[in-house]
Image (tube, rainbow, N blue to C red):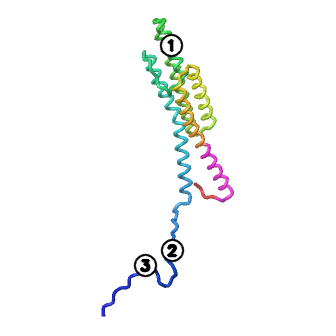
Amino acid sequence: MDQKPLEPAPLDASTDGPIEPEVVEPVDADPLQSLRAELAQLHARGTSGAGWFFWIAALSMINSVILLSGGDTHFVVGLGVTLIADVVASGIADQNPEIGGVAKGIAFGFDLFVAAIVCLFGWLSRRPVLPIFVLGMFLYLLDGLIYVLAGEWMSVGFHAFVLLGMWNGFNAYRQMRAMKAALEQQLAVGFAPAV
């Protein structure tokens, strides 16, 4: 006699209702993986915020080259302080062509110096040296006031946008430091494994 293999029934007749599916909890191979991911995300946000200093320096130098070579346009993200130096130098060159090259050279040297300082702020902010990050944001805020006085509202708006990006980066670095300090404190008393 041929016996057919028994097939499982969709419902077990011995129970009063449907069988509940078994819930399987995922096993996390590394319990610190989410913490590491959060720290990496905060670090990336901080680096992005500090990166604005490099953009500001680069676009300010492009503005300077354009203005000192006779152009009349500029990027809205550039620095107002370098813009003033370039406009003054261009005005001197227009009034006194014999010393125009010297005036433009001095203005360009000043622009390079300011761009180097802004890059230094970016480099130190990415370390992250938080007081330097705050000082850089404050100086950029003051620079934005130059555009307020000039009535350059697009530049004012972009300064505000950049400051928001910088603030997000600074805040991310601050949160990252607080998390690391809490973990170090827990490690000191033996409550947490090393990250």
Q: Nearer the viewer, residue 186 or 175?
A: 175
Q: Using the numbered discs, state the Cα–Cα distance from disc 3 to disc 1 in whole angstroms.
A: 87 Å
For numbered disc 1, what is the local secondary structure? Answer: helix
- Which residue position holds label 3? 10
Q: Position of residue 26 (x, y in %)?
A: 51, 65
For numbered disc 2, what is the local secondary structure? Answer: loop
Q: Position of residue 89 (x, y in %)?
A: 50, 13
Furthest residue toward left: 1
Q: Quadrant of the N terminus?
A: bottom left
In terms of image quadrants, where is residue 50? top right
Q: Using the numbered discs, state the Cα–Cα distance from disc 3 to disc 2 in whole angstroms.
A: 12 Å
- Which residue position holds label 1? 89
- Which residue position holds label 2? 20
Q: Amino acid at mark 1?
A: Ala
Q: Using the numbered discs, state the Cα–Cα distance from disc 2 to disc 1 in whole angstroms.
A: 81 Å
Residue drawn at x 54%, y 18% is: 84
Q: Is residue 164 magenta?
A: no
Residue drawn at x 47%, y 84% is: 13
Q: Which mark is residue 152?
A: none
Mark 1 Cα shell of 10 Å, populated few (<14), some (14-19), many (≥20): many
Q: Which residues are magenta?
A: 174-191
Report the number of numbered marks: 3
